[in-house]
């Protein structure tokens, strides 16, 4: 292993002719590799880097600036003005006065340590994920916020994992210590009733009162155990808050994300989120990323977590600065906090701060770290807490502070013990006051239909573009067809129904944000929401030109990510309940790349944290012979996650149904995630098109009952495209004894409407028909419920055989299966 002593005792000049500037440049580029960053000198040992084997006065001067307890990687930034800015700050350390005095810094360090020690003594054997070894994070954040307030920041959105979270909640966010201790006492009855979450995952809000009189609203985002999953949610929330503010939004709203070192290096969702930094529609004008780097990830050492020297190396994909700072040098930590805030506010860029310390205890306090790192922990045992070192350094006796904080925390613990109240839930911003969650109530229903003339007017408004716009001939044809629909000469298809739903909401004042891969055009060439001039590639968006005072319409073709993009939209919807926020998967199965966001935030966020979201997922679904990978949006997964009306899971089978569903999602005050299985070939299925009149109907129908056949002998119940195949086949077989019922909403389960549809055909046997295999689709969710509703009437099912993969790769086999399904559905039935 490389050690510092391997560096030659007497470095030799690489090039005796080097000028002072050349020597400095060498240190600007490589100095970080020689710096003293690891407080315990164990993992990050200076490597012998030939480039910096330089001695002499110039080298000593440069070394003191770039190879001390602060190091910076910035020479990969192509923009010279940014490099010059950093150089200027690094080479002029004097005159940069921190906001925090030495006394205040000591107070914060002492509080941070004492908070942990009191929990350790009072709640032995519980997990708290102590910050000890990295307590410098607390003065760092305080300084960062002090400086940010001076630079105009009014809101900060924090994302962080378990490490030091309770400490940050109390010492930065301002959550009452008593409330935290109440959680340790476990007096929240919700946790015994299946709801709630553990104390180190729940979010918090507070206010930071800066010394300059400024105030910053602080939001610590609730997050799951899944490391880094919160990153895109933080960014999406920040963007929503910025958009709400307007032009000054980026300057006022600051995202701050605190990462673990192993998670930073390892988790892909973070790499995806980082890539959002400057993509239009997703940028937040820079986030400040702090790696709370204890040089351990559970039991894993850096060499087991990172392929390269620093956990931060993945951030080098972007032209952003990476500061490393030794967390035992509190003054250096404050200096970096100021530089980071200045840089972000000046350049609207991400900044990474790698705060390097150690971990005093095991991964959690119930873990014994001496089993895996015996030598390191022998060293840590003798290493004094930072507040003691710092007190000595500045010549202040810390004992009075220790006594004061100990008494304060013990008093809070006493109150928590007597506390029988449920800890207070976070107060949501006012813009949430009009939107309830909880279980569905019929009083939430609204009229989503529109007068005929209004539909026509909006539809026709979407088919026009400026005279001098050079439209693509194919798009021109599409718009001509849409104009025919608008004039009532042709039934509406899905693409048009969606456009009219959007258009009508916009003119009624509801903003819309849609993002997904190829979402501007639409994967199936069905949307064309952005027209492209074929001569100059300028863009025209008809949905932005419907009325003078219409609401904002945004549509983005997103980067190729499911996890970060869906996390972002979930976050955006969390802070903008008035907006219809939609995320679209290119094919529905790609959403499984975002499974953590779906499981941990969308399905369970309300139950765990009491936090609502109306995010809408558009998931193309349908068995069409496209093979295992493009056929299924995995209906079964969403249904397995469904309970207590946590999400709406729908499959609209006609264009008008889709129109009503989209409008209902945002017009009802009920804010619930909406999962929509959207069409592929059904986009153009004539049976799925809708006449103009269907848009004037009251609202979305959870169930489409059989109306053409009377007193059927068999009722085929289904959802989605298969229903249209069944109708075509019934026609072909000229059967008038079989009814077809479309279940358009699967959750909340529309029991009453299904019952009514069944009662219209009292003599009918019931058959559930699905195109998915037995182990997929809605089968296992729906059969017990249908049987419960059917009473003594038998309920059977028709489906593909159980299968390990979603669908066959052979188009011929697919067709054969499809015929068999239809045969089984109509088998043994006469006229
Ligand atoms: C996606 C994911 N995988 C595994 C875990 C289990 N786990 C919890 S903490 C942890 C180590 C994290 O190390 P690091 O990021 O360095 O943070 P530290 O705990 O050291 O502060 C692991 C593996 C998790 N929470 N999330």
Image (cartoon, rainbow, N blue to C red):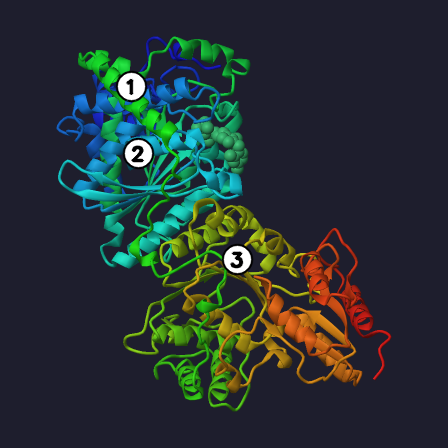
Measured Cα–Cα span from mark 2 to mark 3? 33 Å
Give the mark toward the camera: 2 or 3: 2
Residue 325 location in percent, x, y? 31, 26
Report the residue at 51% width, 24% height from top. 303
Q: Is residue 184 left or right of residue 650?
A: left
Q: Is residue 127 above or below residue 216?
A: above
The residue closer to the viewer here, 434 or 327, is 434
Q: Which residue is mark 1?
A: 406
User: Secondary structure under badge 3?
Assistant: loop
Q: Is residue 1 above or below residue 607?
A: above
Q: Which residue is mark 3?
A: 647
Q: Residues within 10 Å of mark 1 (few under 14, many from 20)?
A: some
Measured Cα–Cα span from mark 1 to mark 2? 15 Å
The residue closer to the viewer here, 340 or 472, is 340
| Earlier residue among tags 1 and 2 | 2
The residue closer to the viewer here, 493 or 162, is 162
Q: Residues within 10 Å of mark 3 (few under 14, many from 20)?
A: many
Viewport quadrant of the C terminus: bottom right
User: Secondary structure under badge 2?
Assistant: loop
Report the residue at 35% width, 45% height from top. 426
Q: Which residue is mark 2?
A: 176
The answer to whether residue 602 of the structure is visible from this angle is yes
Residue 342 location in percent, x, y? 22, 39
Q: Is residue 555 left or right of residue 705?
A: left
Residue 781 location in percent, x, y? 67, 57
Q: Residues within 10 Å of mark 2 (few under 14, many from 20)?
A: some
| Earlier residue among tags 3 and 1 | 1
Measured Cα–Cα span from mark 3 to mark 1? 46 Å
């Amino acid at each position: 292993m490389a050690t510092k002593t391997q560096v030659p005792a007497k470095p030799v000049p690489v090039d005796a002719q080097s000028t002072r500037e050349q020597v400095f440049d060498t240190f600007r580029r490589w100095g970080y590799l020689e710096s003293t960053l690891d407080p315990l000198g164990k993992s990050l040992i200076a490597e012998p880097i030939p480039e910096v084997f330089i001695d002499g006065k110039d080298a000593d001067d440069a070394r003191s600036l770039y190879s001390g307890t602060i190091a910076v990687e910035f020479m990969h930034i192509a923009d010279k003005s940014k490099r010059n800015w950093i150089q200027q700050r690094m080479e002029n350390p004097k005159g940069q006065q921190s906001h925090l005095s030495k006394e205040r810094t000591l107070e914060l360090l002492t509080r941070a340590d004492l908070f942990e020690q009191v929990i350790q003594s009072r709640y032995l054997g519980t997990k708290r994920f102590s910050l000890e070894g990295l307590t410098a994070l607390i003065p760092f954040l305080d300084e960062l916020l002090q400086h940010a307030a001076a630079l105009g920041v009014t809101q900060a959105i924090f994302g962080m994992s378990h490490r030091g979270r309770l400490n940050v909640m109390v010492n930065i966010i301002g959550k009452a210590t008593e409330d935290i201790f109440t959680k340790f006492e476990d007096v929240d009855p919700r946790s015994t009733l299946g709801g709630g979450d553990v104390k180190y995952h729940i979010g918090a809000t507070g206010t930071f009162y800066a010394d300059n009189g400024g105030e910053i609203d602080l939001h610590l985002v609730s997050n799951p155990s899944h490391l880094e999953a919160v990153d895109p949610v933080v960014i999406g929330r920040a963007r929503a808050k910025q958009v709400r503010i307007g032009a000054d939004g980026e300057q006022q709203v600051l995202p701050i994300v605190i990462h673990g070192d192993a998670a930073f290096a390892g988790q892909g969702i973070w790499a995806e989120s980082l890539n959002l930094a400057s993509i239009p529609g997703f940028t937040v004008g820079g986030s400040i990323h702090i790696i709370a780097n204890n040089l351990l990830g559970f039991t894993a050492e850096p060499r087991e977590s990172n392929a390269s020297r620093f956990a931060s190396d993945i951030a080098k994909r972007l032209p952003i600065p990476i500061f490393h700072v030794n967390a035992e040098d509190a003054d250096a930590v404050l200096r970096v906090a100021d530089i980071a805030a200045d840089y972000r506010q000046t350049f609207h860029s991400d900044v990474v701060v790698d705060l390097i310390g150690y971990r005093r205890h095991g991964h959690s306090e119930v873990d014994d770290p001496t089993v895996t790192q015996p030598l390191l922990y022998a060293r840590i045992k003798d290493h004094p807490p930072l507040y003691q070192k710092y007190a000595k350094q500045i010549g202040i006796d810390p004992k009075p502070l220790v006594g004061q904080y100990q008494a304060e925390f013990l008093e809070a613990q006493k109150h928590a013990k007597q506390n029988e109240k449920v800890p207070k839930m976070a107060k949501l911003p006012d813009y949430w006051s009009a939107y309830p969650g909880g279980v569905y109530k019929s009083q939430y229903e609204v009229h989503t239909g529109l007068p005929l003339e209004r539909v026509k007017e909006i539809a026709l408004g979407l088919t026009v573009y400026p005279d001098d716009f050079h439209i693509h001939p194919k798009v021109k044809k599409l718009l001509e067809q849409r104009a025919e629909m608008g004039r009532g000469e042709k039934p509406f298809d899905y693409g048009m129904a969606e456009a009219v739903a959007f258009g009508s909401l916009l003119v009624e004042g509801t903003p819309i944000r849609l993002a997904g891969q190829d979402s501007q055009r639409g994967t199936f060439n069905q949307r064309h929401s952005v027209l492209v001039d074929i001569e100059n590639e300028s863009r025209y968006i008809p949905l932005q030109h419907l009325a003078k005072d219409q609401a904002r319409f945004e549509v983005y073709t997103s980067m190729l990510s499911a996890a970060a993009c869906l996390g972002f939209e979930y976050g955006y919807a969390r802070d903008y309940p008035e907006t219809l926020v939609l995320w679209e998967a290119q094919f529905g199965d790609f959403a499984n790349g975002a499974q953590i966001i779906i499981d941990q935030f969308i399905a369970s966020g309300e139950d765990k944290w009491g936090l609502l979201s109306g995010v809408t997922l558009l998931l193309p679904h349908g068995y069409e012979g496209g093979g295992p990978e493009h056929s299924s949006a995995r209906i079964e997964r969403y249904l397995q996650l469904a309970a207590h009306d946590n999400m709406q899971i729908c499959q609209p089978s006609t264009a008008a149904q889709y129109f009503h569903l989209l409008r209902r999602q945002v017009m009802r005050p009920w804010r619930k995630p909406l999962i929509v299985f959207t069409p592929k070939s059904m986009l153009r299925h004539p049976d799925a098109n809708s006449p103009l009149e269907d848009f004037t109907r009251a609202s979305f129908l959870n169930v489409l009952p059989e109306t053409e056949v009377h007193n059927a002998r068999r009722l085929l119940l289904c959802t989605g495209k298969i229903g249209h195949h069944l109708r075509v086949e019934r026609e072909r077989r000229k059967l008038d004894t079989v009814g077809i019922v479309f279940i358009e909403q699967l959750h909340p389960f529309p029991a009453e409407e299904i019952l009514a549809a069944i009662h219209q055909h009292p003599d009918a046997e019931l058959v559930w028909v699905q195109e998915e295999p037995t182990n997929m689709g809605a089968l296992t969710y729906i059969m017990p419920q249908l049987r419960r509703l059917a009473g003594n009437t038998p309920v059977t099912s028709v489906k593909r055989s159980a299968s390990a993969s979603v669908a066959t790769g052979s188009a011929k086999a697919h067709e054969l299966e499809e015929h068999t399904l239809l045969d089984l559905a109509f088998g043994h039935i006469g006229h």
